[in-house]
Amino acid sequence: MDNNITLITGGQRSGKSAFAEKLTLQRCANPAYIATAEIHDDEMRHRVDIHKQRRGAMWTNFEAPLSPGNLTINNDTCFLIALPCGP
C-alpha cells in the first residue's frame, strides 16, 4: 500500500464522504473511518447513522472529535478522517 494523503473538499452534503469512502475502498481492504464531528442534535445523529449504515461492517469506526491524532491504528489499515466542514 502506498503512503499518500488525498484531500477532498466540497460544500455541505455534496457527497464528499461517499466519494472518500469509495476511494478508500479502492486502495485498501481493511478500512477505518475516523469521525471527528461532534453530535449535538438529533439531525446530526441521524446523518451519522446513515453514514455508518452506508459504510457497513467492513469498516472499523473510531470516534475522535477532539484528538484524532492520538489513535493507535495498525499499519495495514487505510483510514479516512472526516473533518466537519460546517459550524
Image (tube, rainbow, N blue to C red):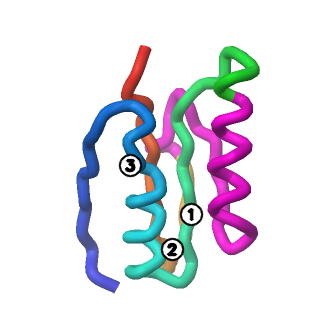
Residue at mark 2: 77
Residues at circles 2 and 3 in contact by the CB criterion of under 8 Å: no
User: Are dots 3 and 1 in contact, CB under 8 Å?
Assistant: no
The quarter of the displayed image where residue 82 is located? top left
Task: Give SS at disc 1.
Answer: strand
Q: Amino acid at mark 3?
A: Lys
Q: Is residue 50 magenta?
A: yes
Residue 48 drawn above or below residue 37? below
Magenta residue check for 34: no
Q: Which of the two discs, 3 and 1, labels the residue nearer the N terminus?
A: 3
Give the residue at mark 3. Answer: 16
Label 2: element kind: loop
The segment highlighted magenta reads 45-70
Question: CB under 8 Å between callouts 2 and 1?
Answer: yes
Residue at mark 1: 32
* Residue that appears at 53% across and 27% down: 66
* Crowding at mark 2 (Cα within 10 Å: few <14, some 14-19, many 20+): some
Give the percent coordinates (x, y) of residue 49: 73, 43
